[in-house]
Image (cartoon, helix red, strand yellow):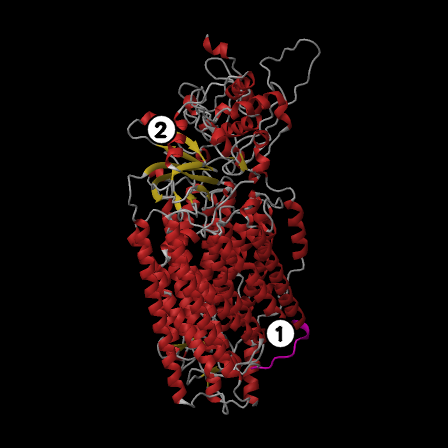
Amino acid sequence: MMDVSQSALHPGGPKAAAILQLGRFLWITATVVYVIVMGALFYALRSGTTRPATFADTDADEPERERVRTRWVFAAIAATAFILLLFIFVDVSTARTMSRVGGEKPLRVDVVGHQWWWGVKYPDTANPQNIIETANEIHVPVGRAVFIKMTSGDVIHSFWAPNLDGKKDLIPGHETRTWFRADSAGVYRGQCAEFCGHEHAKMAFYIVAEPRAQFEQWLQSQKSEAAQPTDSLAQGGERVFLSGTCAMCHSIAGTGAASNVGPDLTHLASRRTIGAGTLPNNPGNLVAWILDPQSIKPGVKMPPNKLDPQSMRALVAYLGTLK
Amino acid sequence: MREEDEIREKLETSWDEGSGLWAWLTSTNHKSISKRYIVTAIVFFILGGIEAGMIRAQLARPENRLIGPDLYNQIFTMHGSTMMFLFAVPVMEAVGLYLVPLMIGTRNVAFPRLNALGYWMYLFGGVLLYIAFFYNTGPDAGWFAYVPLSGPEYSPGKRVDIWAQMITFTEIAALIGAVEIITTVFKQRAPGMSLNRIPLFVWAMLIMSFMIVFALPAIVVSSSMLAMDRLIDTHFFNPAEGGDALLWQHLFWFFGHPEVYIIVIPALGMLSSMIETFTRRRIFGYPAMVLSLISTAFLGFGLWVHHMFATPLPELGQSLFTAASAAIALPTGVQIFCWIATIWSGRPRYTTSFMFVIGFFVLFIIGGLSGVMIASIPYDLQAHDTFFVVAHFHYVLIGGAVFPLFGAFYYWFPKMTGRMLSERAGKWNFWLFFVGMNVTFFPMHILGLFGMPRRVYTYLPEMGWGNLNMLSSIGAVIIVASVCVFLGNVWVSLRRGIPAGDNPWDGSTLEWATSSPPPAYNHLFIPVVEGRDPLWDMREGELAVVTGLRTDRHEGLLTSIMDAEPEHRFEFKGPTILPLLLAVFGGGSIVIAIFTPWGVTVGSILSLVILVCWFWPTISPDYDTPRKR
Amino acid sequence: MSPRPHAPAWSVELALLLAVSSLTACKREERDFRANPPSATAGNPVTMSSLQPGPTIVQTALLNPYEDNAYAVSEGKTLFGQMNCSGCHSHGGGGIGPPLTDDEWIYGSDPQNIFATIVEGRPNGMPAFRGKIPTYQVWELVAYVRALGGLQGKAIRTTRDDHMMLKESEQARSKGHPSPTFVPPAAVKQ
């Protein structure tokens, strides 16, 4: 349905690339070590099997061969120790590479984990009222570091977009930080990596890395309040939204809906997915989701809404205007 | 020989526990209790396996609707909890409690009644968990039960309380087993079996027991804190009131990581026994093996943070745990090299047991190498909580513990039952398990790197994880077939197996010196040991023995810790119903405490009454030297 | 390792009994995500007066499908915070609105009374949530409000939450004894 990339093997930024390089070193070393040890084991088995059946049960014989064996065992232990030291060296130097941010001042994004969606904020220190709120989709400029400050609104979650970086936990009562940089434009999928209850499996998010100009444009459009609907159908939809159950949980800037229980919907139509990365965002899926989210994502906090077809048509038309 | 027969007859009479239900409930003989322990653990292994099968069935296809998230979370929690708490640790302790007294030449474990209590506690804990599961009250917060998800706000109902109390049961049982083994090994070894002559299996059990004694208190504390947070509103893990959610992770993994070594170290001991017998060679580098086990045990306590690399802990501190995690590969490597050297010098016999030993090498080393990988912080940040880790620890635990355990079954089954398991079926058992294991778990490494997190009940079709998951599920079917072959083999062999004789494999340790199955009193005479492999050392002659112990009561010999010099004689306690009663009242108070604190009060009083009976001073009328008090 | 010499013969029966009884499951532990209680579509389930015009209609009491369900109580507690019930009832202690933890229930303590209070609203400030909260969530709130008043079993009630504790938890409260008298609001005023 859409291009999905969620893999540690296809890095889109320097941190994931450094880890992949470390991974290659580890996989190759491990394979070599494994082949050698298996070779030794099967050599040992073979040389034993060729011994005569009258083989004595005592090992008082052959002190010379015993010495050879001792030497080999010591050599193997020394080799193991050497490989482990090499491993620690490579590991620490990779960690050092990954901790170097460099470049211009990083973009700051705040992420709050909820059961089972991601709240995303772009704070503006100069104009605090210009804060952008969105959910489950993080737009970042290509080539600029992104500094992420995370906390959780309920249980422990873990922020993980394998194409860009390893994971970092979101823990209530703690503030965790991480950073990443996307070096090539693209859409990267991420997913909660710490078991967090019923819908842990469907708590995904997207990182959209786009060229600088496009990102600035997105940022500007997100700062605006929701546009007043012009056609009558969408106006009716706004009434459905504000008068019914929707506004009890969701907010849309510029309308009376200001609850922060569920994801902010001010620019819903500009997002790629609904239900935290569960379904592509299109009118058909919106109808299915609003009618019965529990069949798509059992346990999700959003209740089923039995709207009559007319209201549903209007509501979806209205949501479609929230670009 | 007439004299010997007379002694045998007397021992038979004094150690006989009778038959019937009452005798079954009151038995304090380490062999009958251990056999129950092993059978019960295998039942839980099968139940845990059924849960694993359900997990694989659900994950075989994307967006599968077989099992919903609520049940799935219960199932994977049950699978983990069952395999760790109700199968792996108990079965290792059970094999130890069966074999250690035989191997060191004593008649029973140190505290026979306590031993019985341990089994009952374990049984009740497991039964509690499964009854709760049947009533939709199975724990659903993972076997690691991270707060706040497992805490009062996010896990309503009694599911997690059941889990916490099941932990209480099993930790009591595990600690009892550990105390039994430590005391028995230190004080009841046959004369002459100085510390440097203990079989490596016994060393492994001893070291494992010490690990239990040091690791279990951490989970005692944390599960009690969790239960109190949930039941009486304490705030140990509530950040808003000065608690901390990370505290749980530290305490849990301070137990949880050593737990892995608690499971694997006894298996390493089993391997030493089997390798020695099936290559007809003494283990190469005995002192190095013992020291490796001890250093593994020490280092095992310094690794817990490598489960927490994604948490906000200082990075320098985390690096220390990388180093420790890498360092533990060294003693493991030493043991593997020593075993290979042993095999090199010997002439292997490819019995089913030995096939499982080879399987151990092939699988465990994969798990060990991927373990070193995830000791690296950057690499772990990608692999942590993905299927890569699932693959890693199944290679470690199945390769490192279950394969040796299956080998041990084929090895010691003749001793325990007097009949051989079928070697033909055994080879099927091995090859199916070996192939199934690799087909199931190797693809998981790749799935993890493709970004599939753990503990998900489903995944979207467009993620492209479907084929590998299907392959993995097919592998699970092969494992099921293998376990069925094993159970069938046991079933048939118990009835029609070839009689084993005392020492079918030509083993070197003392358990092979007595009949199969061993009599209630183990050895007719307590043997005297003059070397590391008593049965190989004496070859032509006969085992030197201790005579003169009383036969009309359960008399044993206490020896010194270091050199096993005889110190004095003592009496083992005989059969009694008290352990069962204590387990019923003590266990009842644990269960009722979930619903009302009064459970603790009433249960404590009843338990106290039992304990008064338990410790009531008794002096047998025929006491050797009546002492004046 | 021989089979148990005296494996209890009743083990099969016990297993069967367990299997059968598990069909009844445990209501306390159910997690019903797609609730559609039959009573959800009923209109105003409570009447303020026993007088009726026309032929007598027998009022059947509506039962809360979530009574005795720990998950629903817990969800109700979350909703209690999210729907800003605490804004007036202050975690059940009362402030602008009446306390919910005492034994006095102005509009009745039965599930259908509380349901009506939430859906219809009440004079002097209690807003009507009709159409604002789906019916099954109202029932979850009802289950929680009754837990606040000690009217749910201890094993059902919620316990401490992961926030500042401004009051004792629901489970620590003693059993409620709701005063049975129905006091119309007007009577209180004058």
Q: Distance from label 1 to label 2 (Cα)?
A: 72 Å
The picture quadrant where one finds residue B285 is bottom left
Q: Residue furthest bottom?
A: B540
Chain at tag 2: A
Q: Residues within 10 Å of mark 2 (few under 14, many from 20)?
A: some
Please say if A153 is above or below B628: above
- In this orientation, which residue lies closer to the viewer: B444 or B237? B444
In percent of the image, x 46 and y 15: which residue is there? C125
Please say if B509 is above or below B153: below
Q: Residue furthest right?
A: C55
Identify the amino acid type marked 2.
Ile
Asked which secondary structure carries label 1, the reply is loop
Residue C31 image point, x, y percent: 56, 38
Asked which secondary structure carries label 2, the reply is loop
The picture quadrant where one finds residue B514 is bottom right
The picture quadrant where one finds residue B176 is bottom left
User: Is B361 contained in the magenta span?
Assistant: no
Residue B50 image point, x, y percent: 60, 55
Find disc 2 in the rendering and name its residue: A131
Residue A77 image point, x, y percent: 36, 73
Chain at tag 1: B
In percent of the image, x 42 and y 51: which residue is there? B382
Q: Are marks 1 and 2 in contact (CB under 8 Å)?
A: no
Q: Which residues are magenta?
A: B494-503
Residue C83 image point, x, y percent: 46, 25
Find disc 1 in the rendering and name its residue: B421
Identify the amino acid type marked 1.
Leu
- In this orientation, which residue lies closer to the viewer: A105 or C114? A105
* Number of marks drawn: 2
User: Relative to residue B168, is residue A144 drawn left or right?
Assistant: left
